[in-house]
Image (cartoon, rainbow, N blue to C red):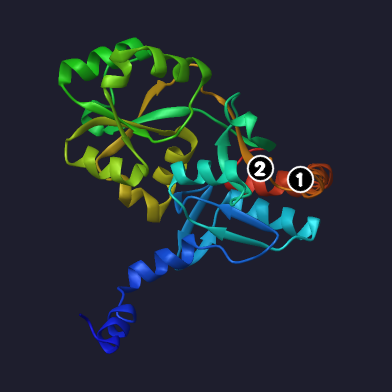
Amino acid sequence: MKSRFQIMREIFTVPAIHLLFFLLSSPVYCDIIISASKNEFPATYLKAGKWHGMDIELLGQLMTRANRDYQIVYQPFPRTLLNIQNGSVHIAPNLVKNKERSVYMNWIGPVRVTCIGLVVKKDDQNLHVTTTEELINTAKLKNKKLGYLSGASYSPSFDHRLVNDTDLAEILHFLPDNAQHRKMLKLGRLLGYFQDAFEVRQRLLDEEFASHYEGLALHPYRIEDSCTGAYFGVSKKLDREIYNGLEAAFQAMKDDGSFVEIHQKWVGVDP
């Protein structure tokens, strides 16, 4: 049996990375808990222990205007969706609005337009793929799968096909983080992976983030019907008065030009 000293020593020698993850994923009490991805530049990203991004800046202004305390935590995307449903997480940014999520979420936005594209190796940038059918056939021909973010929703038609078309389901490789898909793609274990085309374009233009995509490219293919708005999803468990205050704050930002300024800063054009 371990002595009390041995147990305490093990507790206090937990690797720093594990302690950081615990702190990032463990909310403290405040009005609003926001679950954000730490790797979705320029929407939300973590750098030197601080949160940055277009959505982070927008949310900060919304909370200030609505006079609400808030905390941003990182949780894997599938867990975020579960916690939005049970109310332990109140807001998730950078979401596609759909019928299924609208059962347990209200919405603020859209904050920008998004289309879901395909990241591939540069050698495959000119693959003749314009439809999902051609994508399935190409993946089968090359005997490689495509990375798909667990719990993601990219378009109603694609979601429906994912449930009902075994050919599509069989070529997908599900993981909770696209950073893992990027590593697998570079190793040649995937044909490509799906990601917000806007985010990928912005990363390729950024000096720091472009290095993460060395040898990779954005293919012209876009998932059918995926060009839609990116929203803040708000748990329906959150008090309605708080939600109404946040929605009013967003409208005020649109009216006074604050939203346009942030959109221009991160996207480069007017909304």
Q: In the image, 85: left or right of 143?
A: right
Q: Nearer the viewer, residue 48 or 215?
A: 48
Residue 128 shows in this picture? no
Which quadrant, please, contains the C terminus?
A: top right
Count all numbered tags in the image, as a single digit: 2
Residue 23 location in percent, x, y?
A: 47, 68
Q: Which mark is residue 234?
A: 2
What residue is at 64 percent from the left and 65 percent from the top? 29
Q: Secondary structure at mark 2?
A: strand
Q: In the image, 234: left or right of 169?
A: right
- Disc 1 from disc 2: Cα separation: 8 Å
**Circles 1 and 2: CB atoms closer than 8 Å:** yes
Amino acid type, label 2: Val
Which quadrant, please, contains the N terminus?
A: bottom left
Task: Of the two numbered discs 1 and 2 on the same chain, state the one appearing first in sequence.
Answer: 2
What residue is at 30 percent from the left and 11 percent from the top? 134
Where on the picture, by quarter, is residue 112?
Answer: top right
What residue is at 56 percent from the left and 37 percent from the top? 95
Callout 2 crowding tier (Cα within 10 Å): few <14, some 14–19, many ≥20? many
Q: Which mark is residue 243?
A: 1
Amino acid type, label 1: Tyr
